[in-house]
Amino acid sequence: MSSSEEFGSSSSPVKKKFRGVSPAKMGEVGVRDQGPGHAGRLWLGSYATAEAAAVAHDIASYCLRGGTSLDGLNFPHVISSKVRTDLSPRSVQKAASDAGLAIDAQFAIQKSSEDGAGG
């Protein structure tokens, strides 16, 4: 399944409204989360696509809240049974960031191949 089939095609950073995702500077989207028992919010980064930010939010939400949060996720089918729920806040940030950046990379590769095929 391609990233566009799995997440929907995104031509603008804030095309759709996803839980936990908000517009950030220069056309990017930002995401932050606050888990139960955490004093502050975790900044999860800025991403080129809203889908990437939504996946980062989902990973962080699941890591912080566990399986009880599946109903509130943007893409619950993306969560693997291997995602750990016993991570430190710093590790949650890293896991969420890695997931979001991977989605952005998939969109960039797809866009690049479409641009090359069309021209």
Image (tube, helix red, strand yellow):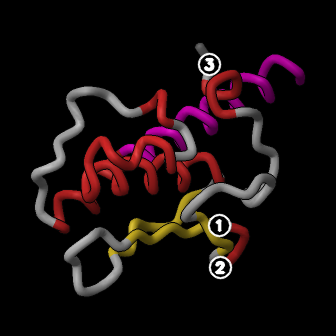
- Badge 1 marks a residue whose secondary structure is loop
**Most common secondary structure along the magenta stretch:** helix
- Which three-letter amino acid code belongs to the residue tagged 3? Ser
Residue 28 numbered mark, or none? 1
Report the side of 59 relative to 73 (left or right).
Answer: left
Which span is picked out in magenta? 99-119
Q: Is residue 64 above or below residue 76?
A: below
- Which residue sits at x=81%, y=17%? 117
Quarter of the figure with the N terminus: top right
- Which three-letter amino acid code belongs to the residue tagged 1? Glu
Q: How many marks?
A: 3
- Which three-letter amino acid code belongs to the residue tagged 2? Lys
- Which residue sits at x=49%, y=43%? 71
- Badge 2 marks a residue whose secondary structure is helix
Q: Which residue is mark 2?
A: 25
How far apart are the alpha carbons under marks 1 and 2? 6 Å
Labels 2 and 3 touching (C-beta < 8 A): no
Near-viewer residue (73 or 41): 73
Report the side of 83 relative to 3 (left or right).
Answer: left
Near-viewer residue (48 or 6): 6
Labels 1 and 2 touching (C-beta < 8 A): yes
How far apart are the alpha carbons under marks 2 and 3? 28 Å
Residue 62 numbered mark, or none? none
- Which residue sits at x=78%, y=24%? 114
